[in-house]
């Protein structure tokens, strides 16, 4: 006889798991007697065919924490299924009070969930319920088609813009080699300006409820890029001929030529698996590299701002002439890497949730 155990959640919206399932592997079971004794000890006794042939089998399990006295069981030709409710719906470190697991007790890996897997499964179920709820509400939305058309066109325009930047820089790199590093800004800045100004809509869209993504991570990325583009590159002629511009623009455009087509297809409820994989994977090396390139650009601009006194803050005579804008940029560097951490955490959660959900669908 072997007893298999798993922890599973009955109610979808509960965040803590409150039930224990036991499976006693006995066939031709008769005279099943299951009761809960003192000290939360489950006693099982039944007649059936097991490891010792036709015999009477019994076992006791003293649970780690209190359980409810109501015990449900169901006998089949090959096993006895037992369901027990915990008094407090939460995870246990182990099943029994004794640390050493009884020899006859084994996990039921077909249904076993650890805490992190269960949380992800519950989250996926909640998202499914929310999606059904949202769909039931938006079916009567007369502007649904208009909203999807707007989002599709926005992503299409952004994709075309970043694709132009990416292709232009790639072609010039093959033709001119390293010489293309020094005039990147003058050949692509207009389109990059346009794309980054359009990107402000990515902060507005979630605030208007047009997309489900959070506005804060989008605001961090859009604001950070605009500081680099408009302040560091756009206001300093000395920065526009530096090779760092090439690396910043190239990394930005490489990420976006995969992100925006993914969103375009999502607007028409279509998925291309390779594109999905690239969208949730390409940022892993490229996003940190992009932030490092932006940080290099900021560091290179500090002495220029000190020398030109551009954007310096006027001060009273007793405190000096002015406070250099470079101090603001030095503080900005700290927030830049804090934003990197926040966005990486947000993107990693998106990626994990996406592939966990897909895995559930496959199984």
Image (spheres, rainbow, N blue to C red):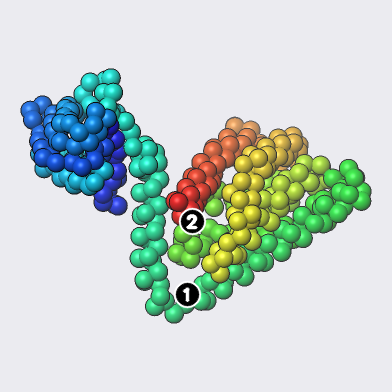
Which residue matches tag 1?
Answer: 144
Res 309 label:
none
Label 2 environment density (alpha carbons within 10 Å; few <14, some 14–19, many ≥20) = some
User: What residue is shown at x 64% (from left), y 61% (from top)?
Assistant: 261
N-term mark: 2 or 1: 1
Which of these two is toward me, 197 or 98?
Answer: 98
Q: Position of residue 58 (x, y in %)?
A: 16, 29
Which residue matches tag 2?
Answer: 213
Is 103 situated above or below 339? above
Which of these two is toward me, 70 or 182?
Answer: 70
Q: What is the residue that sits farthest to the left in this orientation?
A: 38
Q: Whole-Å distance between the Cαs marked 2 and 1?
A: 17 Å
User: What residue is shown at x 15% (from left), y 31% (from top)?
Assistant: 56
- Left or right: where 129 falls relative to 330: left
Q: What is the residue that sits farthest to the front in this orientation?
A: 54
From where the camera sits, is residue 144 visible? Answer: yes
- Left or right: where 41 falls relative to 219: left
Q: Residue 344's image quarter?
A: top right
User: What residue is shown at x 40% (from left), y 72% (from top)?
Assistant: 138
Which of these two is toward me, 354 or 3?
Answer: 3
Q: Position of residue 185 (x, y in %)?
A: 80, 52
- Left or right: where 301 falls relative to 315: right
């Amino acid at each position: 006889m072997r007893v298999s155990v798993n922890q599973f959640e009955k109610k979808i919206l509960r965040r803590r798991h409150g039930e224990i399932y036991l499976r006693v592997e006995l066939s031709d079971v008769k005279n099943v007697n299951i009761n809960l004794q003192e000290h939360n000890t489950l006693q099982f006794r039944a007649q059936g065919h097991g490891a010792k042939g036709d015999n009477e089998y019994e076992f006791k399990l003293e649970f780690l924490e209190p359980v409810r006295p109501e015990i449900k069981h169901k006998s089949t030709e090959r096993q006895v299924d037992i369901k027990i409710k915990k008094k407090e719906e939460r995870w246990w470190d182990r099943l029994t009070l004794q640390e050493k697991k009884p020899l006859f007790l084994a996990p039921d890996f077909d249904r076993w969930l650890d805490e992190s897997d269960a949380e992800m499964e519950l989250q996926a179920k909640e998202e499914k319920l929310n999606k059904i709820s949202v769909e039931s509400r938006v079916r009567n939305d007369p502007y649904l088609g208009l909203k999807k058309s707007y989002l599709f066109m926005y992503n299409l325009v952004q994709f075309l813009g970043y694709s132009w930047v990416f292709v232009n820089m790639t072609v010039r790199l093959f033709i001119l080699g390293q010489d293309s590093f020094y005039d990147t800004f003058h050949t692509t800045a207009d389109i990059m300006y346009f794309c980054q100004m359009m990107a402000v809509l990515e902060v507005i869209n979630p605030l208007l409820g047009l997309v489900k993504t959070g506005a804060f991570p989008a605001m961090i990325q859009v604001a950070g890029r605009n500081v680099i583009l408009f302040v560091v590159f756009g206001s300093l002629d000395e920065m526009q001929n530096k090779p760092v511009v090439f690396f910043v623009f190239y990394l930005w455009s490489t990420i976006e030529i995969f992100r925006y087509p993914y969103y375009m297809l999502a607007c028409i409820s279509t998925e291309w698996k390779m594109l999905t994989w690239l969208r949730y994977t390409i940022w892993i090396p490229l996003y940190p590299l992009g932030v490092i390139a932006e940080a290099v650009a900021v560091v290179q601009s500090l002495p220029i701002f000190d020398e030109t006194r551009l954007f310096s803050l006027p001060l009273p005579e007793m405190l000096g002439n002015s406070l250099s804008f470079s101090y603001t940029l030095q503080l900005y560097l700290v927030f830049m890497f804090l934003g990197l951490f926040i966005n990486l955490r947000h993107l990693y959660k998106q990626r994990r949730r996406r592939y966990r959900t897909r895995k559930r669908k496959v199984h």
